[in-house]
Image: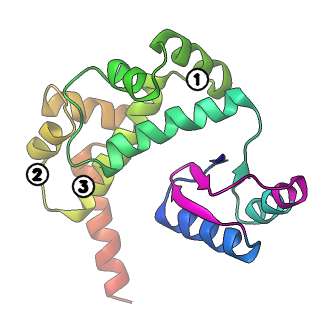
Amino acid sequence: MKLYIKYMVSLRCKMVVKDELKKLGIPYTSVELGTVELLSSITDSQREKLKQNLAVSGLELLDDKKNILIEKIKGVIVEMIHYSEELPKVNYSDYISEKLNLDYTYLSNCFSDVKGITIQQYIILHKIEKVKELLLYDELNLTEISYKLNYSSVAHLSNQFKKITGLTPTYFKKLKAKRKQNLENL
C-alpha cells in the first residue's frame, strides 16, 4: 500500500515520517520524498492518527487523487533538480510525462489548476534555489552552474535569477559572504 504525503521535501521530513510510522507500529518498506510504501493496509484509525501526527510537523497525508498527482509531479521535479547528478538532456515535459506515465498536457493542466502556477514556473523556482545552493558552496563558477543546470548561457541564468530574487547571482554571493563575515566578527 502506498501513502502520499504533502510538503515532504527533505531528508529531515523523511526522518519525521519514519519516526511517526514507528511510534504507531506501522511497518513500511520505504520512505521517499512524498511517498511511503507500507507492508500492508492500515486501519482508518491508524490513518487518522498518522494524519494528525504528521500535521504537527507541517506534513499532510493526502487523500484526494488530484493532490496526490500534484505531489508526484513535485516529487519528480525536486528529485530531478536537487538530487540528480545532472539534469536530463530531454525536455522536462517529456521527462516528467515519462516518469509518471501520463500525458504532459493533462499533468500541466492539473498542476496549474491546483498550484496556480505552471510546471515550468515551478521548475524555474527550484532551479534558482539550486543556483543559490551552488553559489553558497562556492565550488562552481557561474559558467559551470549554468552548464550543470542546462541553461543556454550565463546571461540566461543571471536574468532568470534576477527576475526571481531581485538580485544578480554575483550580488547574492557577495551578500552571503558579507553576512558570514559579520557573523564571524560577533
Q: Residue at x 40, y 32 (%)?
A: 123
150 left or right of 78 in image? left
Mark with earlier residue (1, 2): 1
- Say the numbered circle drawn on residue 111: 1
How far apart marks 1 and 2 lie (CA) works out to 33 Å
Of the residues tagged 1 and 2, which is closer to the observer? 1
Label 3: which residue?
Answer: 134
Q: For the view shown, which residue lies furthest in the bottom direction?
A: 186
Other residues around mark 3 within 10 Å, as few (<14) / some (14–19) / many (≥20)? some
The residue located at (59%, 53%) in the rendering is 36
Q: Residue at x 73, y 61 (%)?
A: 54
Q: Which residues are magenta?
A: 26-48
Viewer-nearest residue: 162 or 132? 132
- Image check: 144 left or right of 124? left
Q: Is residue 123 in view?
A: yes
The answer to whether marks 3 and 2 mark residues whose Cβ atoms lie closer than 8 Å is no
